[in-house]
Amino acid sequence: MTTVSEQANFTFSPEEVARFERDGYIGPVKIFEPEEMTRRWNIIRRQLLDRSLAIYPDSNGKANISNYDRHLDIDLLAEHIMRPEIVDRVGSLIGRNLLCWRSEFFPKYQGDEGTDWHQAATFAHATGKPQIIWPSDEGRPAFIGTITVWTAFTHSTEQNGCLQLMPGTHTSMNYDESKGMDYDADAINQREKDGIKRGFFGYDYRSLQKDPDWKPDESQAYPMVLKPGEAVIFWSNTMHASLPHTGSKTDYRMGFAARYVPTQVQVYPGTENLTEYGDGINLEKYGAVLTSGVDEYGHNRIARTSQRGYEFVPRQIPS
């Protein structure tokens, strides 16, 4: 089992920060050795079946929404979102006072479509109502959104549907999330776009384009091939997508995304219920996790402990 010293510091160098600011992403970065990631995933995948302490009810397999935020009931995921290999790096990009406001799984199996090219600044795309709001009168990075740390729990290859990113596209938004989108479960795995099988979990992200005649420049796409335990860190408003799964049945892809914002950001403002993917969840048991630093603002409900009794102790990043 791989262990990491509590004194280890994984903060990005000034050169790495500059690269991130230029490209909108950085990776691969190692979170776990492949063998350790495989061991952890074998435990986690069994625990996912037990929803007795999950904070959202089962959605009867409709969509991914019921598997949001499983870090609040599965200890290995609770540990994952607070790993210094993640928190130190994210802190060096957007500040040391950090919240993890959401986690979610992204599986892809044989025959699954790729994911549409998209950007997310407020995560309002499904309903038109922002899920995160940055303050307008305080210092902040040049481009709002969230930092996503997408970790490969299995191999992620071009054959089994790896992520694609377009460097430098975080500097402007091509989509208007306030429009909202119409959900159609029957459209999943049924559409081709420019010869590639793509969709957005029952939505068509192209309906949010500011210019309906605009098309993403596929020649600028970079495939993010990852080993188990490797991650890519990116601004959510960097253009990203995924390829369809054209590989074998046994070669499935599993990604786990943890999303981070500074503590001054409001999460789910004025929202008690979240509706996405033809389903809805109540946020009564929800809480963001303070993963490092302090919360000086008090905007958000904070999960102090998980229901299993896991104590969320913020990591103090070395000066």
Image (cartoon, rainbow, N blue to C red):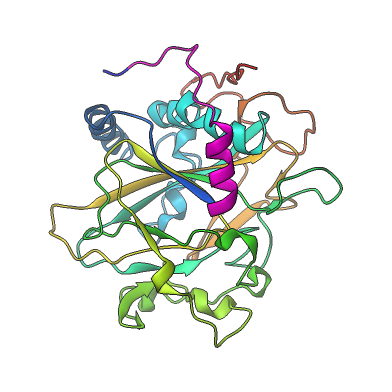
The answer to whether 6 appears left or right of 129 in the picture is left
Residue 147 in sight in this render: no
How many callouts does the rendering have?
Answer: 0
Image quarter of residue 34? top left
The residue drawn where x is 59% and y is 40% is: 286
Farthest residue in the front direction?
Answer: 15
Instruction: Say which of 273 and 310 sits in front.
Output: 310
| Quadrant housing the N terminus | top left
User: Would residue 17 be visible to someone looking at this image?
Assistant: yes
On screen, 319 above or below 306? Answer: above
Please provide percent x and percent y for residue 162: 31, 56
Locate residue 8, reporting x and y percent: 47, 16
Q: What residue do we see at 31% from left, 74% from top?
A: 189
Relative to 287, say whether 194 is above or below.
below
Identity of the residue drawn at 53% across and 53% down = 23
Which one is nearer the viewer's eye here, 74 or 175? 175
Q: Residue at x 75, y 44 (%)?
A: 140
Where, by quadrant of the figure, is residue 92 drawn? Answer: top right
Residue 257 placement (x, y as % from top left) = 45, 45
User: Magenta region: which residues?
Assistant: 3-23
Q: In this view, does 56 lie above or below 160?
A: above
Residue 180: in magenta span: no
Farthest-out residue, right: 137
Taking depth in this image into account, of 152 and 103 the one nearest to the observer is: 152
